Amino acid sequence: MAYSFDLNTSNSISFDDFTDFVAKTIIPDKTGSLLECVEKFQMLSNNEEFLLNLLHEQLEDIYAFQKHSFHSAHTLMLYKGKNFYIRANGWPPASNSDGAKDWQDEMYHYLMAHDHNFSFLTVGYLGQGYSTEMWEYDNNNVIGYVGEKVEMEFLEKTTLPKGKAMLYRASKDIHVQLPSQDYSMSLNIMPLTNEIVRREQFWFNLKNRTISSNSGTGRYLILDLAKNFGNGKTKDLIEKMSVTHEIPFVRMKCFDALASLLGSKEDVWKTALNDDHKIVKEHARLILDNELFI
């Protein structure tokens, strides 16, 4: 089911009171704690001045403006707590220029179906809001390679207007966003959780119901470099990582690098069959059966 909540309060709350409430309520790895924040989040969306006041505060010291932000150009960091942060996202309507439209689709992930490897709560703050199609899948049944068939169920097509809240569940909800009819803004509560480094994030082809891409992380670039430029010491380090690293996708990439460094694909992937996690074992099986090439 999709977790959507229409605005049901006319009350408002200050930003300070809101962040205090979230700090006392949020448990990063407990999605249910986000649901406890829905009403207060909708109350914050009724506060039409807080975001402008925060913007004024930052503009007064332009050299400090968003200096701690690590997000893309359409995102503003509003608050960072011990185990969560609050951000605002801008959503422009589709451009009439083909070149600008292509850039927008890339920047805002319009028309690109994807999941998230973290749960978060969002609420519409300004405008009619983006449109989104929601799908659901079971990440536990996914190996994670490009072209893999994925069973998914359509949930709903909806929008995120001012005051409406939605919960996006980690590695469960797939969504594809469409541009808003007007300039819109949304707010997000983002828990700081270790799950984000343990799970992969995927792009999907909804027409074929397959995985089209794995977003990966900087860890993979390091292993790709090791695969192509490594030496004996590199091999020793990666052999250790292939059996000790907690993240199965990293272990799988270690075996891939070792197969190249040792020049012995079959032996390496036979060893990978002994891994406890199906992501590693199934990649190994498919590679040994010449059904997958990475």
Image (cartoon, rainbow, N blue to C red):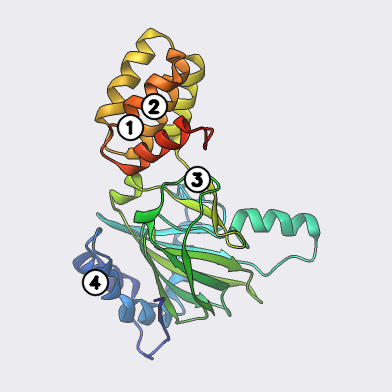
Q: Using the numbered discs, state the Cα–Cα distance from disc 4 to disc 1 in whole angstroms.
A: 47 Å
Question: Residue at coordinates 46% horizontally, 80% vertically from top-left?
Answer: 48
Residue 107 position in % (x across, y down): 61, 54
In this view of the protein, which residue sits in the foreground, 135 or 162? 135
- Amino acid type at image mark 1: Leu
- Amino acid type at image mark 3: Asn
Residue 67 position in % (x across, y down): 45, 46
Sequence-wise first label, 1 or 3: 3
Label 2 SS:
helix
Circle 4 or circle 2, nearest the eye: 2
Tell me the number on the disc at residue 214.
3
Sequence-wise first label, 4 or 1: 4
User: Which residue is outermost to the left?
Assistant: 24
In which quadrant is the N terminus drawn?
bottom left
Q: Using the numbered discs, state the Cα–Cα distance from disc 1 to disc 3 in whole angstroms.
A: 22 Å
Question: Residue at coordinates 24% horizontally, 58% vertically from top-left?
Answer: 29
User: Which residue is outermost to the right?
Assistant: 97
Q: Going by the image, does 275 lie left or right of 114? A: left
Residue 270 position in % (x across, y down): 36, 26
Callout 1 touching callout 2 (CB < 8 Å): yes
Sequence-wise first label, 4 or 3: 4
Circle 4 or circle 1, nearest the eye: 1
- Amino acid type at image mark 2: Trp
Question: Residue at coordinates 42% horizontally, 74% vertically from top-left?
Answer: 166
The reply to whether residue 97 is in sight is yes
Q: Using the numbered discs, state the Cα–Cα distance from disc 4 to disc 2 in whole angstroms.
A: 50 Å
Q: Using the numbered discs, state the Cα–Cα distance from disc 2 to disc 3 in whole angstroms.
A: 21 Å
Q: Which residue is mark 4?
A: 21
Q: Which residue is mark 2?
A: 269
Tell me the number on the disc at residue 273.
1
